[in-house]
Amino acid sequence: MKNLLFAVLALLMMSHVVSAQPLTVQDVLQSQRELIEKSSRRTIGPAIDALVDSGLPQMQTVLELWQAKEIWQRKADGLFFTATKNDDGSYTLRDFEDGAEVGTAPSTDLKQLKPNSGVRAMIATALVQFQLSDPDVTKRRDALDSIARDPGPDLLAPLRAAIPDEADPDILARKTRLERLMTMAYDNDAEARVAAINDMSGDLGVDFRATLNPILSTKLVAAPAGAPPDGNIAAELSPGGDALSYSGAYALLVAEDLVPVQISADARDAALEANIEGGRVGGFPVAQLNTEAARDQAYGVLVDQGLAAPMVTPKDVEASLAAYRFFQVYDEPSAEVTEAAEAALAASEGRVAVGQAVDLGLDALSLMSIYFLAAIGLAVTFGVMGVINMAHGEFIMMGAYTGYVVQLFVPNHTASILIAVPVAFAVTFAAGVALERLVVRWLYHRPLETLLATFGVSIALQQLAKNIFGTQARPLTAPAWLDGAWVINDVVAISYIRIAIFILALLFLALFLFIMKRTRLGLETRAVTQNPRMAASMGINPDRVNMLTFGLGSGIAGIAGVAIGLFAKVTSEMGSDYIVQSFMTVVVGGVGNIWGTLAGAAMIGGFQKGVEWLNPSNTLAAQTYMIIFIIIFIQFRPRGIIALKGRAAGD
C-alpha cells in the first residue's frame, strides 16, 4: 500500500513538472503544423495569430524567417528549423530558441517553407506589431508604411502602445498622425472618433480626406411612406430630381422586391415568340402583330391566361413611387461621427480650394519667369532696333546646346551650370553680333525682308544643330540640389528648378535695369531708342549701339536657353516652342519696355495656366484661347500694356 502511494505521488510530481515546462517556439509551431504545411492565404490566419499571441520574444525572428523563406521542416518528425547550407549540400539545423545547432540533414530529408505572396503579406501585417517598437529605426518606418498601406482595427492598439516610448521626432509625428486616422476609422468609442476628427479638422492631407470619405459613404434606401428607415439618415431624395431619377427610384424598388419588374418591349416580344402556337399568339395571327398596340393586346391575353407577367403602366409606376419614400443613409451608424466628418471635410475642402489657387498662382509665376527669360532678349532687339528677329528661338537653342557641351567636359553638374551660363552668353553674343553685321545691318527699315532673312537663318541654324547633335533630345542635367520640389503642403508644391528660374529672372531684371540706367551702353541705347538722329548728332554711334544691343539680346537668349534646358528637352526645334510666346510677350507688354515685357509675361503666363486649369485635358486649347485673347487685346491696346515713345513706337 505504501509503495502504491509513493508511485501515485511520483506520478503527480512528474505531471506537475511537465506542466510547469515553459512554452517553446517549437511547441507553438507544432500546434499549428497542419495550417503551416498547407500555407493557404484563406486558412493561415489562425496560425499567424497563434504565433503572435504566444508572447514569445523569438516570434518576431521566426515570422521574419518565415516571410524570407528561410524555415525548413524535417520530414521525419515534422519539426521546424532554420538552416544553413553546407559545402557538401547538406544543411546544418538550428533551434529557434537560441540558434544552437541541433544536427545536420540532407536536402532530401527537408522541406523548405515557401509562403506565397498572399501569406507573406499577412506575415508582414503581423510583424508590424513587433516592428513598431523595434530598436532599428528603419524597421519602425517600414512598419508605419505597412500600416498605412493596409490599416486595420487590430493594429490600432499596438500602434497606440508604441507611441509613448518613441524617441525619434519624425517617427513620433507619423505614429501620432496615423493613430488619429485609425481612431477615426476603427475605434469603437464614438466620442474618441469625434475627438480625432475634430483634432484634424481642415487638414490638407490626402490620407485625412481618404479616411473621411468611407465614414460619409451612403446607400440609397426605400421605406414605406409612413415609416422612415432605421439608421443614420443623410438626406431624403425626391424621385425626378438631380440625385434620383424616376427610373432609378423604381429600379431600387424592384431590386428590393417591393414592386413588379417593368416589362420592356424586348421582353414582351420574347414572351410572344415563346407562346406562338399554330401561327397565333393569344388568338391573334402573328401576321397582325405588326404594331405596338397589337403586340400589347396579344400580351394582355397571355397575362390573362397566366402565361406572362403583368405589364407595369406609367400610372402603376407613379402609384408605386408615391407609396414609398427614398433616403440616403450613412453606412456609419453614429450621427455624431458623421456630423463631425461633414464639418471637417468641408473645412478641408475649403483649405484645399485656397491651396489649389495658390498652387495655380505659383505655376503661373513659374511660367511667367520662363516667358520673361525667353522674351527679354527679343524685347531688347525689337524695342531698340525695330528688328523682327525670327532666329531668336535658335539663340535659345544654341544656349541649351552650349550647356550640354559644357557638361560633357565638366561632369560636376553644379560647376558645369555655373560655367555654362557665361559661356552660353559669350557664344550667343558672338552669334548675334555676327548675324547683325552680316545680315541685319543691310536690312534696317525693311521689316519684311528682315523677317524673311532671319527666318531663313533660323532654318539654317536648326539644320546645323541636327547635323552636329543629331535629332535625338540631349540631356542637360540639373544639379542634385535642384532635384525635387518645395512641398508646402499636400496641395501646394513647386519644383526647385522652377524656383531657380524665377530667381534667375529676377536677377536678369535687376541686371538689365542696371545696364540701362547705370552704364554708358544703357544711356546710349536709350538715346538711340528715343531719337536716333539726335543721338548721332551728340556723338553716339547708332551703328555700334545696334550691334552691341543685338549681341546683348542674343546673349540673354543664350542664358535663357541654359535655364529652359534644365527642365525641357534640348533639341534643334526647342527654339520654335518659345519664339511665338516671346513675340506675344513683347507685343502685349509694350515694345522695347522691360516692365512691359514683365507685365506681358505675367498676363500670358497667368492666362495660359488659368485656361489649362479650366480645361486640364487639352493644352492645345490653352494656346488657342491665348492667341484669341491677344488678338482681342491688341485691338484695344495696340501699343501694349506699357506703351513706349520713340522709334519702337513708330514715332
Image: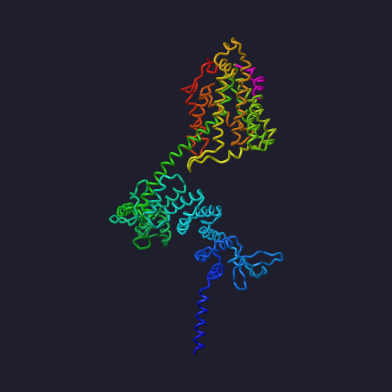
Question: Which residue is outermost to the left?
Answer: 226
Residue at left offset 51%, top offset 22%: 590
Residue 291 versus residue 66 in the image, above or below = above
Residue 516: name its quadrant.
top right
Q: Is residue 251 visible?
A: no
* Residue closest to the eye, 311 or 582: 582
- Residue 274 coordinates in the image, percent (x, y): 43, 61
Residue furthest to the bottom:
1
Q: Nearer the viewer, residue 550 or 243?
A: 550
Residue at image position (49%, 23%) is 640
Residue 317 horizontal side relative to residue 522, left or right: left
Report the magenta residues as a range: 431-444
Is residue 436 within the magenta segment? yes
Scheme by which the image is coloured: rainbow
- Above-or-below relation of 20 to 612: below
Q: Is residue 467 above or below residue 3?
A: above
> Which x, y percent locates residue 508?
56, 27
Q: In this view of the protein, can residue 211 be seen by the observer? A: yes
Q: Residue furthest right?
A: 88
Q: Position of residue 604 (x, y in %)?
A: 50, 30
Q: Residue 2 in the image: state x and y as whole percent.
A: 50, 88
Tell which of 412 and 334 is nearer to you.
Answer: 412
Is residue 83 found inside the magenta-colored segment of the image?
no
In front: 198, or 647? Answer: 198
- The chief SS type of the magenta part is helix
Q: How many marks?
A: 0
